[in-house]
Amino acid sequence: MSERWSVLHLQQNNLRLTLLPGIGGRLWDVNFQGRSLLFQNTDLDGLEVDDTRLTDLPTRSPQFAFPLWGGEKTWIAPDASWVNGAPFPVLDSGAYQITSRSRTHIDMTSAVCPTCHLSVSRRITLTSAESWGIEHIVANHGASSRLTGIWSVMMLNTPAKIGVELEDPAFYPVFGSAEEMIATHGKSTVVDCNRQKEFKVGLPNPNGRTLVRCGPDGPLLMCSVPEPQQGDQFAHDYPFEVFNSGDYAYCEAEWHSPARDLAPNETLSFRQMFRVLADEDASQMPLGLTNNQEFLSCMS
């Protein structure tokens, strides 16, 4: 297997993070108590990568003009700025350099994209036996400002449920039909990605917290990001999106930073904190939700 597929690990007790610097600086997997939570595309695993011929790689989703590698990665929003409908290849599929490494963290940095003139740096930090953080930093190396948002896309094994708490539960279709796979319960909206059906929806995320049920009997994954502030603008209108694949057994939880015009030599950063909860711990943890028990029951 080529050097591009060499992985690194961060581990504490039953939580193991696998990183793949050679393919877009990805968080390739999260394994908790022996269970893999993230999707990896076995059709592509280990194949030789020619960065000039990415569209020649096999795919079950020809409607998307880029390889669906798997794992979690940093994309640049809005997708309207992409070329030929594909994320910037140097940032999504290129090899990242390891710039710092310890027992608890790994820093990875991309090359500068010749098209958008941006670079991406990612720091993944193991903070406990149940938690970790991701810091995304995008730098503008170009001569002009460009509208830029950081877009963290996590490909999760399905079936999975993804929920957010909302004062007025709602969802906003992007494409496809998702009605029969989305339900509102009290002050929450839950997307049930229980089968292969392609759709995408946007969701508000007023308290910055997202819950993911990883399989019908799996653990809960909680992601916390900064709460949206008055005046924040998002490149895709909403701070959170859910995509469900009709071709592979995965769905995506997609978090957005506020977007802004990034001037030359400026940087934009976005931090996420993740925590995995076993069933016996979830009901006891102070999640800070309006009705903790009701929301958790909707995620079962």
Image (spheres, rainbow, N blue to C red):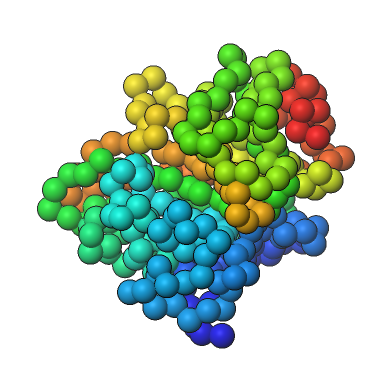
**Quick one: 105 or 94, which is closer to the camera?**
94
Q: Residue at x 31, y 51 (%)?
A: 82
Instruction: Give the x, y percent position of residue 142.
Output: 17, 55
Nearest the viewer among 257 and 242 is 242
In the image, residue 51 sits, relative to residue 194, either above or below, namely below
The residue depicted at 47 percent of the width and 63 percent of the height is 67
Q: Position of residue 101 (x, y in %)?
A: 51, 69
Q: How far across and how far down the image is residue 36, in percent?
A: 72, 59
Total numbered circles: 0
- List x then y, in percent, for residue 282: 79, 36
Residue sitting nearer the eye, 274 or 179? 179
In the depicted structure, whether residue 31 falls above or below residue 44: above
Q: Which of 202 and 21 lies nearest the eye of the viewer?
A: 202
Could you tell whether 141 is left or right of 218 in the image?
left
Q: In what quadrant of the picture does the C terminus appear?
A: top right
Considering every residue shown, the one lying at the far left of the view is: 143
Residue 105 in sight here: no
Please state, as top left, top right, bottom left or bottom right, where the N terminus lies in the image: bottom right
Farthest bottom residue in view: 1
Answer with the quarter of the image where residue 120 lies: bottom left
Query: Is 13 displayed left or right of 141 in the figure?
Result: right
* Residue 159 visible to the viewer: yes
The residue under the point 47% across, 59% down is 62
Q: Residue at x 74, y 25 (%)?
A: 295
Q: Could you tell whether 83 is left or right of 229 in the image?
A: left
